[in-house]
Amino acid sequence: MSYQTIITEKKNGYATVKLNRLREMNAICKEMRQELYSAFVELEGDPDVKAIILTGGEYVFSAGMDIKEMASLSSEEGDEFLDSMVRYLKTIYSCKKPVIAAVGGIALGGGFNLVTVCDLVVASESAIFCHPELKFGFNPLFYPLSQIVGETKAKEIVMLGEPIGANEALKLGMVNKVAPPEKFMEVARNMAAELATRSSKALEELKNLCSIVPRMDRIAALDIEFSVCSLLFARDDRKAQMDNVLLRQKMRKKISDKKK
């Protein structure tokens, strides 16, 4: 599909979705919300895509919601605005495929929300995260952030709105990897390419488990995890995946032996 505010690209078993309003610092307008929703629906249903990278490029992830657009909305238009926010964020949050946020520069407000609904986060050393929404008289999303950093720290982040650098975000568990500005996209692509070698069904089931087992008691959680193990073990592609792993190990050993 052709989009105006985002760019999508597919290769090597994964897709990249890039926010493309650089002049507006990738502020999230109505059209972008609609296009993000459409792109993730399309990519989730694409059997050739096993993982998705969401990025704003090297210099800025997103400055958040388009304040000019929001300021012009009437009270009657508020419900439609909120519905469009809920729709695209829920679609990314519930995507059956792993979503990697590759964050360069600022991720503010709605941009920070976008990061917290992704599964994995690779940040440039230049990345800055912040929730300034309270200053504008409305609330940031609390739940996704609280699931990552805990309720106490999440309250501090959303209430005070202080900026958080990449290395601090790494310590808080908001970020999985930090890399130099010229390297962070490469790290995200390598991560996506590695995920693309995995079984699609196993990835989907594991992502589902990651969502539900933290809310279960210990025994019930183990029971459901072993049930999924049994389901995946019975699949025909399980042996093919194992054979591929063994083949890759043999190839690496041959290369290592030659170097010796």
Image (cartoon, helix red, strand yellow):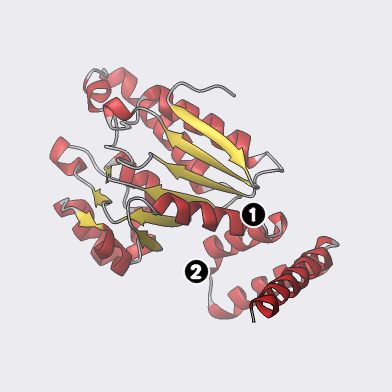
Q: Residue at x 83, y 68 (%)?
A: 239
Residue placed under numbered mark 2 in the picture: 214
The CA distance from mark 2 to mark 1 is 26 Å
Q: SS for tag 2?
A: helix
The front one of 225 and 113 is: 113
Q: Quadrant of the N terminus?
A: top right
Q: Is residue 214 left or right of residue 63?
A: right
Q: Amino acid at mark 1?
A: Ala
Find residue 121 and report its horizontal and vertical position in percent. Answer: 42, 56
Q: Residue 73: which quarter of the image? A: top left
Q: Is residue 215 left or right of residue 131?
A: right
Residue 117 visible somewhere in the drawing: no
Q: Residue at x 45, y 21 (%)?
A: 4
The front one of 155 and 204 is: 204
Q: Amino acid at mark 2?
A: Pro
Q: SS for tag 1?
A: loop
The front one of 37 and 141 is: 37
> Could you say which disc has been placed on residue 196 in the image?
1
In this rendering, is residue 14 above or below 250? Answer: above
